[in-house]
Amino acid sequence: MSSSAQQQPALARYSETIVGAGFKALNLPVQVSTHVIRLRRDAEIYGANEPAEYVYEVISGVVRSYKVLEGGQRQIVNFYSTGDIFGLEFGGVYSLATEAVEDCAVLVVNRHSLISAASPASSIARQLWLLTAVEVDRARQHMLFLIKTAEERLAAFLLLMAKSSTSGLEVDLAMSRQDIADYLGLTIETVSRTMTQFSKRAIIEMSTSRHIVVRNPAALKRLSK
Amino acid sequence: MSSSAQQQPALARYSETIVGAGFKALNLPVQVSTHVIRLRRDAEIYGANEPAEYVYEVISGVVRSYKVLEGGQRQIVNFYSTGDIFGLEFGGVYSLATEAVEDCAVLVVNRHSLISAASPASSIARQLWLLTAVEVDRARQHMLFLIKTAEERLAAFLLLMAKSSTSGLEVDLAMSRQDIADYLGLTIETVSRTMTQFSKRAIIEMSTSRHIVVRNPAALKRLSK
DNA sequence: CGTGATCTTGAGGGAATTCAATGTCGGTGG
DNA sequence: CCACCGACATTGAATTCCCTCAAGATCACG
């Protein structure tokens, strides 16, 4: 895996403006209505195939988007955290379902008024395009995860989590082992075993199953390839 | 695998206008310069990290986009065939390399002039967004491939090929076993074995390794889940 | 017809899954 | 307060699936 850790090529430079900065960077005109909602853990934000009326930004907490396959298997497509925008659909329908991984606050933006605001000389059209381009990047990144071994996937995942955490090498996982398994395309047992492995090899430290300190980031990086 | 075969939700409806119809549907203004080039099998169209000067449309033949991972492993991200547009980058740099799978003709469109033409009330901005949204769809579809068993991946792949073939159930694979393996995240041996399996079970018929007739599409569909 | 590239087939081994049991944590009620 | 319960996580053993390594077979082309 080239993996999330080192390469975020082309796009990264361009996406700073809005990704992470959220909708603020867009300087939305006043006619675009927004409001904030609060969600409890596991609350559904929208279901797959529902009409896509809104676009969202995570204010606090973590959100997961996923797809349920025939056979009931759940594939988590993305975790979104503070500053991430999700639910932007080109077509009028959400292609994935989303839920709160933990208690969340999200900013809700009316999709229609957002798109309307995009028509004139504003840079909004370009930003809508950018947001979708970011999703392509994420999806391709994720794709590369899935052709790796369990160890490599976990290592890359932990680095990803560590990177987006404020405290560098200390990570509080918002998601359960099952969530991680469904994101990485593994079973919960394999995730657990591999975490234990990392711990035994002193690559990470787990005070609780959700609280991880990365002790040897270099080793993680090596393993993530 | 839910797979490419049955679900192409939201987007499909909206994308008819341009996807498959190619750039014609865009009614490009005259200042957008285009020309056609011909490529031999395995010829490079552009490399990863090169400046993205052009956007392309497949006129005839099949093109592959791919990424080479550390360790030399090649992951094919997409196969593009007639009518498909590829190489549209939001940032100024190609994130993937592309090559001709077989002899090809491709339409070359200047990216800069295309984007310039997108500014006014034209629908081009929207179309650029759409094209990127289509890539998201493809990437997510592909992602779902990769969490499946070898048999499921192959079945889904063959259905995908059959769908885009003119003659319904008769497929002439443009790509080698190695290409298929690199697309599906399998080894060439596993691809070969699984194809032989399908053949022995009378699900497909192989007169040559590249020419496949789907004898039992229902079985393929069942296996692809 | 020979040569290299592509594809197929086989045997063995390794990695992840499945099935099953045990362990841990947080909360709730006695 | 602590005993119990359910959700979540870990561990173990057996099995399955795919990969690796190796050898043939087939095809395309000079």
Image (cartoon, coloured by chain):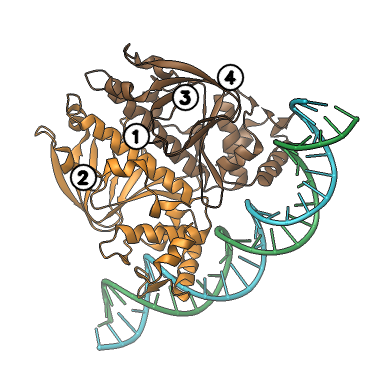
Chain colours: A orange, B brown, C green, D cyan
Residue A189 image position (x, y, % from top left): 50, 65
Residue toward you, B134 or B33: B33
Mark 1 burial class by Cα count in 10 Å: few <14, some 14-19, many 20+: some
The residue where tag 3 is placed is B84
Q: Looking at the picture, which amino acid does disc 2 mark?
A: Gly
Say if labels 1 and 3 share a chain: yes
Residue at image location 22% in from the left, 34% down from the top: A111
Q: Nearer the viewer, mark 1 or mark 3?
A: 1
Q: Quadrant of residue B55?
A: top left
The residue where tag 4 is placed is B166
Q: Nearer the viewer, mark 1 or mark 2?
A: 1
Q: Looking at the picture, which amino acid does disc 1 mark?
A: Gly
Say if labels 1 and 4 share a chain: yes
The dot on residue B92 is 1
Circles 1, 2 touching at the beta carbon (< 8 Å):
no
Question: Which comes before the other along the chain, label 1 or label 3?
Answer: 3
Residue A51 visible? The answer is no
The dot on residue A22 is 2
Q: Looking at the picture, which amino acid does disc 3 mark?
A: Asp
